[in-house]
């Protein structure tokens, strides 16, 4: 059996592929399994021996298993095998077979750069959010606006100076070798100026390496950042928006809101711990609906899901952006997709972190 952490990661992966990357599953069925007549494919389950798929054509269904070359140990090995199947399916597919959403996402990561920048300033946004301004080394960083997010790579030594040419490749190789002194996580750029960016770091009761680094960081502390990317891609006919975010994703939501046209409508559901951890944002006025976890811990709050369950809004030309704790966001995505009958192109849901 998989350990608890891997099992939860696999369940999230299965939900995401079934909900959002079903076109990649179909490509695998048609050109990895050579099931050319299939119309829909879903993952039924994953064991340490195989991935079980349900292949559908009209009213007819059949089960197909893709066996691993050898027994897999964890979610990383499952994910790597899945991408290998996708790559082989693509190689066998006709040249004019459309690229899947997942393949387009992968393409975006191929030419991303790594930047070494340093702390310029720190300030408190709320009782559990620190804003850090970074400067230098990012002159060529593209401004993607909206939810531009980057992979922040920090060293356990707050005074560490990165070697010239340090890259994402170096980080991955050190991690693969074990005992790496680096930790990393995705963060969204809150504000972008020439050769400067502002980033919000959330402080939890049980902080991870990045939050600890943010608390300890001082002027001139260095960090490596890789990116940027964005998931905020509303269709051109969108005229209304729904933003759902916990503290980690609120910078992404705010940055996206600030790039909307003045005539575009939006609703914000922002989760935070309590009244002391919320922040004021004059431009939004009453457009933020704050949802407090109160005694519940981050990643375990139920009130945001309850509010989502009761939402009744017009979904025509609506775009939904949601981000936060991975399991919560997965549940919210499934709820809204079902209740509002949303298409995949009408939504972007991202797990920014996962409670373990």
Image (cartoon, helix red, strand yellow):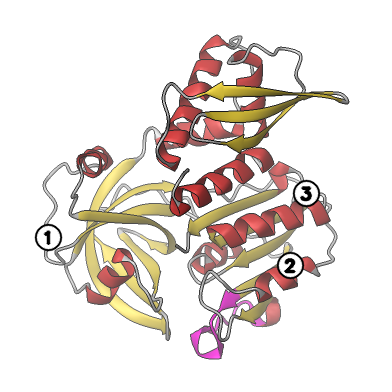
Residue 284: quadrant of the picture = bottom right
Q: Position of residue 98 (x, y in %)?
A: 64, 21
**What label does residue 128 carry, if any?**
none
Where disc 3 sits, the SS reads loop
- In magenta, the rendered stretch is 271-285
Where disc 1 sits, the SS reads loop
**Distance (Cα) linking label 2 and label 1:** 44 Å
Which one is nearer the viewer's eye here, 119 or 34?
A: 34
Q: Residues within 10 Å of mark 3 (few under 14, many from 20)?
A: some
Residue reaching furthest front? 1
Residue 145 as seen in the image, left or right of residue 99: left
Residue 341 as seen in the image, left or right of residue 203: right
In the image, residue 136 above or below residue 77: below
Residue that mark 3 sits on:
342
State whether the magenta stretch is mostly helix, strand or loop.
loop
Residue reaching furthest right? 59
**What label does residue 160 carry, if any?**
1
């Amino acid at each position: 059996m998989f350990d608890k952490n891997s099992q939860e990661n696999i369940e999230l992966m299965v939900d995401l592929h079934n909900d959002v990357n079903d076109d990649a599953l179909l490509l695998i069925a048609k050109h990895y399994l050579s099931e050319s007549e299939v119309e829909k494919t879903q993952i039924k389950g994953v064991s340490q021996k195989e991935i079980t798929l349900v292949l559908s054509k009209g009213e007819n269904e059949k089960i197909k298993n893709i066996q691993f070359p050898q027994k897999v140990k964890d979610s990383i090995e499952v994910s790597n095998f899945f991408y290998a199947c996708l790559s082989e399916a693509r190689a066998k597919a006709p040249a004019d077979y459309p690229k899947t959403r997942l393949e387009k996402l992968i393409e975006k990561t191929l030419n991303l750069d790594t930047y070494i920048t340093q702390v310029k300033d720190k300030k408190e946004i709320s009782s559990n959010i620190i804003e850090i301004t970074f400067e230098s080394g990012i002159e060529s960083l593209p401004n993607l606006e909206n939810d531009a997010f980057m992979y922040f790579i920090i060293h356990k030594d707050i005074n560490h100076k990165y070697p010239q040419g340090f890259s994402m490749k170096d980080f991955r190789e050190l991690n693969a070798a074990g005992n790496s002194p680096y930790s990393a996580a995705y963060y969204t750029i809150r504000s972008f100026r020439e050769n400067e960016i502002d980033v919000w770091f959330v402080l939890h009761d049980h902080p991870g390496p990045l939050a600890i680094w943010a608390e300890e960081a001082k002027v001139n502390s260095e960090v490596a950042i890789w990116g940027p990317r964005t998931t905020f891609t509303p269709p051109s006919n969108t005229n209304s928006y729904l933003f759902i975010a916990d503290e980690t994703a609120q910078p992404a939501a705010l940055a996206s809101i600030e790039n909307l046209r003045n005539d575009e409508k939006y609703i914000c559901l922002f989760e935070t711990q309590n009244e002391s951890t919320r922040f004021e944002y004059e431009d939004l006025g009453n457009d933020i609906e704050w949802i407090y976890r109160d005694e519940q811990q981050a990643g375990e709050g139920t009130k945001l899901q309850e509010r989502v369950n009761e939402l009744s809004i017009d979904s025509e030309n609506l775009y939904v952006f949601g981000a936060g704790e991975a399991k919560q966001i997965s549940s919210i995505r499934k709820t809204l997709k079902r209740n509002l009958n949303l298409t995949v192109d009408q939504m972007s849901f991202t797990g920014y972190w996962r409670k373990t």
